[in-house]
Amino acid sequence: MKDFIKLVKLRLTLLVVFSASISFVIGSKVNGPIDWSSWDFWSKWLLLISGGFLVTSAANGFNEIIEKDLDRLMKRTADRPIPSGRMTNGQALVISLFMAILGTYLLGKLNLTTGYLSVFSILLYAFAYTPLKRRSPIAVFVGAIPGALPPLIGYVGAHPKIDEIALILFAIQFVWQFPHFWAIAWVLDDDYKLAGFRLLPSGKRDRTSAVITFVVTLILLPVSLLPTYYGYGGYYVGGVSLAMGLLFLYQAFGLLRTLEIKSAQKLMFGSFYYLPVVQLMFLFDFIGK
C-alpha cells in the first residue's frame, strides 16, 4: 500500500480531485438549484471523484515508469517503488493501464466530453510534458495544460459545455501553476540537475527566472478577479482573491529581491494556500447567489 501511495503521488492526486470537486459543484449550480439530498447529484459526484482519482493516478504512474532511470538519480525520488526495485515496470504498467481505462470509463459515464478531456490529460502529461522536462523549460507550459484540466473536467462533468465559467476556472489554475512550479523548481534545482531537468525559465536560479516568476504572478492577480468582473462572483470572492493575490505577489517579490532558496520556499508554500482558498471562495460566493 505504501508503494501504491508513492506510485500515484497520493497528496498531489487528492489535490487534483479536490479542485475538480469544487468545479463540479459550480457546474451543478449552473444547471439550477442544487438538491443536496438528491442521489443523482451524489452519484455523479462519486463518479467524478472516483474517475478523477484513477485518471490522475494513472498519469502519475505512467510518468514514473517513463522516468524510472532518472528517479534513481534524485534524492527525493530514489525511494519510489520502481527505481528502488520494489515494483517492476510490468506491475506498474498493468496497474496504471487498469486505472486509466476504468477512470476514463467512469468519467465518460458523466458525458463524452469529460471522458475525452481525461484521455487528453493523460496523454499530454505522461507523453508530452514528461519527456520535455529534460529538453526545455517550455515543459512547464505544456505541463500547465493538463495541470489546469481538473477544474475544467469537474465543471464539464456537471455541466457538459465549455462556457465562460469553465474557461475562467481553467485560466486561474493554468496561470497559478507557473509560479507554483517555478518555486518548486527553484527549491529543488540541485536535485533536478542530477536528472537533467530544466524547469526554471532561464534554466537556472538567477535574476531572469525570478523576474519571469514575478511577472506571471502579477498576471495572476487580474485573472483571479475574472469571476467578479464577469459577474459570476461577488465582492467576497473578489476581495479574497485580491488579498491572496497581493500576498502571493509579495512572496514572488521576495524571491526577486533576495534570489534565495528560503524565499522560494515561502512562495511555494504560499501557492499551496492560494489556489484552494480562491477556488473555495468562488464556490461559496457562486452557490450563495
Image: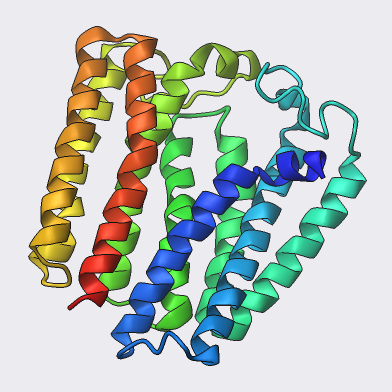
Quarter holding the C terminus is bottom left
Task: Report x, y in % for residue 24.
Answer: 43, 73
**Residue at the spot 20% in from the left edge and 41% down from the top edge:** 244
Q: Can residue 215 be seen?
A: no
Q: Quadrant of residue 138?
A: top left
Q: Residue furthest front?
A: 37
Please state the horizontal and vertical placement of residue 193, each as a whole percent of the image: 57, 14
Between residue 148 and residue 212, name the one nearer to us. Answer: 148
Image check: 75 left or right of 170?
right
Q: Between residues 228 and 174, which one lies in front from this camera angle? A: 228
Instruction: Name above or below for residue 93 compared with residue 51.
Output: above
The picture places residue 189, in percent across and down from the top left corner, at 50, 16
* Colour convention of the picture: rainbow
- The image quadrant of residue 171 is bottom left
Residue under the point 21% across and 44% down = 220
Residue 273 position within the rendered picture, expressed as x and y whole percent measured from the top left: 35, 40
Q: Which of 30 and 256 lies nearest the eye of the viewer?
A: 30
**Residue drawn 71% across the image and 33% down it:** 67
Quarter that holds the N terminus: top right
Asked if residue 35 shows in the view, the reply is yes
Q: Is residue 286 left or right of residue 63?
A: left
**Along the line of sight, which residue is nearer the eye, 260 or 119?**
260
Left or right placement of residue 217 versus residue 2 in this view: left
Q: Quadrant of residue 34?
A: bottom left
Q: Tell me which residue sits at (54%, 11%) in the image.
A: 190
Q: Tally the numbered discs.
A: 0
